[in-house]
Image (cartoon, rainbow, N blue to C red):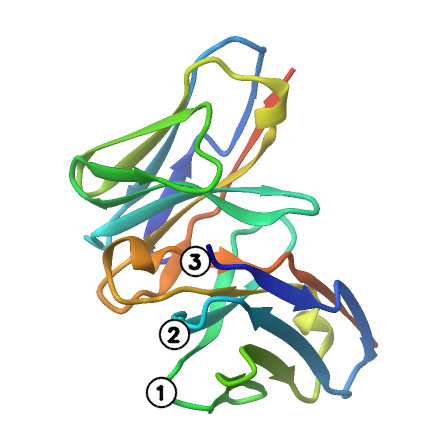
Amino acid sequence: GENVEQHPSTLSVQEGDSAVIKCTYSDSASNYFPWYKQELGKGPQLIIDIRSNVGEKKDQRIAVTLNKTAKHFSLHITETQPEDSAVYFCAASKGSGGSNYKLTFGKGTLLTVNP
Amino acid sequence: DAGITQSPRHKVTETGTPVTLRCHQTENHRYMYWYRQDPGHGLRLIHYSYGVKDTDKGEVSDGYSVSRSKTEDFLLTLESATSSQTSVYFCAISGAKNEQYFGPGTRLTVT
């Protein structure tokens, strides 16, 4: 089955700096890669996703890049703010319906943005 | 939380007792999922459903059963709770485009 590795497990940055979280996946058939943000005591929140037919996607201060050849994808947060502090999860799935909708998650990155 | 509610939000129960967690959605989405979240393991899929009465196992299904008699409700049952099932349980839903949206979670403690 699919295996998703996520690095680093913790990341501390100064407010205004950029943060990058990286994930690798094992199944070359995976084609859907979402990122989730989880604040303490809450459920994971979908913040951005990318499908395998594109290499990059941006939404304001957040961007995701995908390298299908190397089987890795990354989350980039620019101009970080204290409210960006949370645990971030990457995930992967084949995304073609039925059981292929199952997501396999990385183990998470605790991002701390220091004022 | 994308029209997803989970009940109860917190529960403490004793080893050997049955427990049922409920997930309710108002989005009319076809797919529903149950995950557990534990430190060091991230989110792991327990069971999922791809329609009314259609369910299948995930990667950590032992000790759990599910039922889906209506589109809006997905129940997770621990027939005889064990301490290893102490966890935070999340329900998620997805529609045709595969994006999964999560509920607020249920914190279960088995003593």
Q: Residue at x 43, y 49 (%)?
A: B103
Q: Residues within 10 Å of mark 3 (few under 14, many from 20)?
A: many
Residue A109, position in %: x, y?
69, 64
Do residues under tags 1 and 3 come within 8 Å of each other at their CB atoms? Answer: no
The chain containing the residue under callout 2 comes to A
Q: Is residue B5 left or right of residue A114?
A: left
Task: Mark 1 and mark 2 in contact? Answer it, CB < 8 Å.
Answer: yes
Q: Position of residue B4 (x, y in %)?
A: 35, 48
In this rendering, position of residue A62 left or right of residue A102 = right
Q: Are marks 2 and 3 on the same chain?
A: yes
Q: Which mark is drawn over residue A31? A: 2
* Residue position marked by numbered label 1 in the rendering: A53
* SS for callout 1: loop
Q: Amino acid at mark 2?
A: Asn
**Which amino acid type is marked by label 3?**
Leu
Amino acid, disc 1: Asn
Q: Marks 1 and 2: same chain?
A: yes
Residue A103, numbered label: 3
Q: Looking at the image, which residue is at 16% across and 39% down? A: B52
Which element is circle 3 on?
loop
- Which residue is at the front of the view, A1 or B30? A1
Estimate how packed mark 1 is, as few (under 14), some (14 to 19) or many (20 or more) residues with alpha carbons within 10 Å.
few
Classify the position of the C terminus of chain A by image quarter: bottom right
Q: Are marks 2 and 3 in contact (CB under 8 Å)?
A: no
Q: Residue at x 26, y 51 (%)?
A: B31
Mark 2–mark 3 Cα distance, whole angstroms, equals 11 Å
Q: Say which of marks 2 and 3 sits in front.
A: 2
